[in-house]
Amino acid sequence: MRFATWNVNSLRARRELVAQWLREHQPDVLCLQETKVKDAEFPEDLFEDAGYHVVHWGVSAWNGVALVTREPVEQFGRGIVDEDEEARCIVGVVEGIHIFSVYVPNGRALDDPHYVYKLEWLDSLRERAIAEMELGPVIIAGDFNIAPTDADVYDRAALEGATHVSEPERLALRRILDLGLFDCGATLSDPAEGPHFTWWDYRQGAFRRGMGMRIDLVLASESLRASVRSVAVDRLARAAPKPSDHAPVVVEFEHRS
């Protein structure tokens, strides 16, 4: 199973780039985040014309998550808790795997109420993961807005006092991993190639200068660890004209339901 996750930062702006990427990479499952479209305006034809099924949740011009799959999604739900108002999580069963596409809140600043919301949201995600793991293997993929370790950022000192690298955020992520999940991209960094970041700011030539972070993650049940054949970040998508500020993460699983 070729699995991918990508924060596209607006399907309207990235429609042709996404279509081209689907043609070239042919994933079996693609988790999308930050689609920035309401359900009624979602471009289903973009995916159906390429031979995919799609389920989406979007309630405004912000956020938005989707599952794009070769095989139909057997069942799906929106949100991690009933009172969810922001479209940040969708869960579906594909080939026996319970797949989450998540767009974790940014947090904004350590003294911002949105930071507290982020930590609470991660706790709710953990509880939902517990429930889904009782039913089968799980993959939680998406934009976590957390760099798991200092090796996942270009300069830890430059980010001191900022979100994405604070200990409470990292602890919340570790508590999710401790349920029996592993970070597929944790061993990506190759000294010969440099860190495999997944996000670079549009400003200051960050992509060209290597000023990035690894915040787009694929967390999978330990039962799937032995089936991982490769993990890669598609930097070419980030180098394309008018790109998202995130690059797709692609994991090859040797999985049969």
Image (cartoon, rainbow, N blue to C red):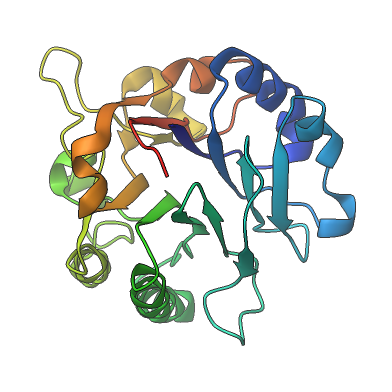
Tell which of 9 and 32 is nearer to you. Answer: 32
In the figure, 28 relative to 205: above or below?
Answer: below
Decide which of 175, 242 is in the foreground and name it: 175
Relative placement, left or right, of 15 versus 32 is right
Quadrant in which the C terminus appears: top left
Q: Quadrant location of residue 57?
A: bottom right
Give coordinates of residue 19: x percent, y percent.
Answer: 71, 23
Query: Picture coordinates of residue 252 (x, y %)?
Result: 36, 28
Tell me what residue is drawn at x 62 percent, y 50 percent. Answer: 34
> As drawn, is 63 to the left or to the right of 15?
left
Q: Is residue 14 left or right of residue 221?
A: right
User: How many marks are shown on the rendered structure?
Assistant: 0
* Image position of 163 (left or right of 37): left
Residue found at the far right of this picture: 40
For the view shown, which residue lies furthest in the left direction? 191
Most extreme residue toward the front is 257
Whether residue 213 is visible, yes or no, is yes
Q: What residue is shown at x 55% (from left), y 38% (from top)?
A: 30
- Quarter of the figure that contains the N terminus: top left
Q: Quadrant of residue 195?
A: top left
What residue is shown at x 39% (from left), y 17% (from top)? Answer: 208
**Residue nearer the viewer, 94 or 23:** 94
Name the residue: 15% across, 34% down.
Answer: 187
Q: Is residue 83 above or below residue 131?
A: below
Where does residue 23 sit, x and y in percent of width and height? 65, 16
**Looking at the picture, how far across and down is residue 232, in whole percent?**
33, 25
Q: Is residue 22 above or below residue 117?
A: above
Q: Nearer the viewer, residue 225 or 251?
A: 225
Q: Identify the image quadrant of residue 64.
A: bottom right
Asked if residue 154 can be seen in this view, the reply is: no
